[in-house]
Amino acid sequence: MKHVLNILSYLGYALARVYLYPLYFLSGLVRRRMDLWVFGSWGGHRFSDNAAAFFLHGQNEIADAVRLVWISRQADIVKSLRQDGYEAYWVWSPQGLYCCLRAGLYIFDSFSKDINFWPSRGARKINLWSGVPLKTFERDIRTPGNRYYRLFHGSTPERWLFGFMMPWHLDRPDLIIATSPETADITQRAFDLPASSVVVTGFPRNDILFARPDGAAALERQWPQCFKDAVEAGRRVFLYLPTYRDSGKPFLNVDWVSVDRLMRDLNSIFLFKLHPDDQGVFEEDLDYVAELPQEIDIYTMLAQADVLISDYSSIIFDYMLLNRPIVYYLPDLEEFVASSRSLNFDPLEIAAGPVCMNGEELLKALAGIAAGTNKSAEQDARWLEIRHRFNTFADGESSQRVLDAIDRNVLNDRIASGR
């Protein structure tokens, strides 16, 4: 039944293209306003990541000269942003469609579909790419069964079909950001862009890690109660953030009871949040282990976490900016490598902390960090080397660098000349 529903869904998407492609063509005939920018994130379903961070930065820096509009497919996001005094519209509302048709700039996290691809022809596209490229992506994917491989390297019918269904992947951005020269080279190759279109700025979402104290109250309002209680009580916070597996299998390979017991002994709390696409279910009722709600923006909490536990997620490189312990929990390393897209980096070669292959090693590493027995001069040197390799900047000014790059590379210093 599920297979039939999937086929019907794809047929529906294909039929919708009958009127959407004419809209795309006609949108290129509309005169664009360079003082109107539209934003979106995660396919229009979230207000988060680099696009959200840069949107908020723009409100403080250029809202008097540029109209900044958030476009979403979620009514609750639109309502919340309006309550906070920002301009936001549902993607297919008359106001939302008008803004998309007139906007000179589309600013998004991954692809223009984060906003609305179909009225985007003729707009300048700014891609605030949301991850450090541990795994290959776009044109670099060389796994024959992967749909993106078929889109870029498959047979002619395959390229035509997947291009017809996912045209935003073929729509090269005018500007895309990266965190270091090495990741910029990978990004340039994957998107097949000229070097001038890739700018090393750092990620706007990481500016919050350097937030000044006067912004603390706004951050704390977004915290779940369990996290707030732990911070106020001065308890150590272990934060576990596993990434999504390309295999699609849920991942919760943790001995929760043992972790709970250890957290009790350490007067700490162990919080975790699954990747949005992970279908794993946590059903334990424990005192020192808790799952964070999916809707929470983890970046509002990251600076208050004492230890990060992760695996192959790019959040590791973000957290490195804080110079705090990271534990690499890789119990499925062989399976991950076998079932994943190929990797740009060997996870073991870029690890800057304890690598744990099973639950026993994980518990030992957590206890060692709490006791302060895991540090050494050699490890500190390795940490700094890897952090600089993946993060050129560590200063909380990435949003401003993005704004300056847009102004310089796309707007011909229009904003600077107006100041």
Image (cartoon, grey):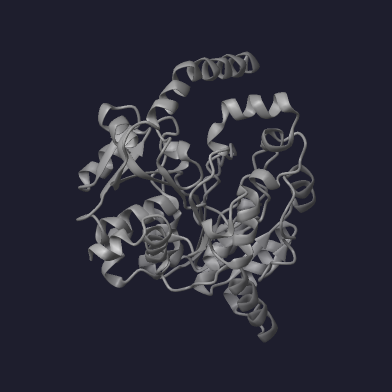
Snapshot quadrant of residue 206: bottom left
160 or 268: nearer the viewer? 160
206 or 322: nearer the viewer? 206
Point out the image quarter for the N terminus: top right
Residue lying at 30% horizontally and 71% vertically, measured from the top left: 213
Residue 270 location in percent, x, y? 53, 58
Let me know if residue 219 appears in the view.
Answer: yes
Q: How many marks?
A: 0
For residue 282, above or below residue 373:
above
Snapshot quadrant of residue 207: bottom left
Let me know if residue 264 appears in the view.
Answer: no
Residue lying at 58% horizontally and 15% vertically, measured from the top left: 5
277 or 409: nearer the viewer? 409
Point out the image quarter for the C terminus: bottom left
Residue lying at 58% horizontally and 62% vertically, measured from the top left: 316
Left or right position of 257 against 289: right
For residue 158, above or below residue 258:
above
Residue 377 location in percent, x, y? 66, 86
Left or right position of 11 against 347: left
Residue 231 location in percent, x, y? 39, 65
